[in-house]
Image (cartoon, rainbow, N blue to C red):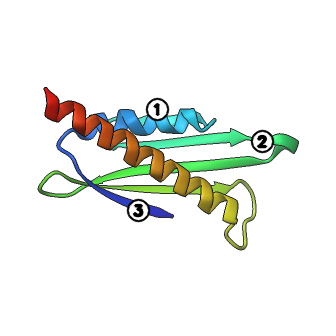
Amino acid sequence: MRRVTFIQSDRQGVFDIIRQVVEEHGFDVLYADRYHLEVEAMKVGRLGRKKHMSVRIIEFKNNELEVNIEVRNMGLEIKRNKRNDLLEAKIERALNLLILKDRKNFSAA
């Protein structure tokens, strides 16, 4: 599980960016809750292998948001898969880049 912390006042904007990043990485969104800020998605790979992604946004005071990203294999997973950790890191980096770009657009307005 990866945790990323942002200081951003627009939590719905961060939620929209998360959905965009999840879909760009080939996941199909199963469940997206704008009120509780949760996204559940699944990706079916070759040979029927399935990955499940869970992304949650936790809101703290002073516009601080924590994003929890977790990618798991469907079925029994006794030890963590390094590819899942790498995928979590890729999604975290993409999220960082989009939010930083978005923040620049807000500051220019």
Q: Amino acid at mark 1?
A: Gln
Q: Quadrant of the C terminus?
A: top left
Crowding near the residue tagged with mark 1, few <14, some 14–19, many ≥20 C-alpha atoms within 10 Å: few
Question: Which label belongs to residue 103?
Answer: none
Q: Which residue is mark 3?
A: 3
Q: Which residue is mark 1?
A: 20
**N-terminal of the two: label 3 or label 2?**
3
**N-terminal of the two: label 2 or label 1?**
1
Residue at 74% x, 46% y is: 50
The local secondary structure at tag 2 comes to loop
Q: Position of residue 22 (x, y in %)?
A: 52, 39
Question: Which label belongs to residue 45?
Answer: 2
Q: CA distance from mark 1 to mark 3?
A: 18 Å
Q: Residue furthest top?
A: 109
Q: Position of residue 78 (x, y in %)?
A: 72, 72
Q: Quadrant of residue 17?
A: top left
As displayed, is residue 56 above or below residue 106? below
As displayed, is residue 57 above or below residue 1? above
Q: CA distance from mark 3 to mark 2?
A: 25 Å
Report if residue 108 is visible in the image. yes
As displayed, is residue 25 above or below residue 81? above
Residue at 68% x, 65% y is: 82
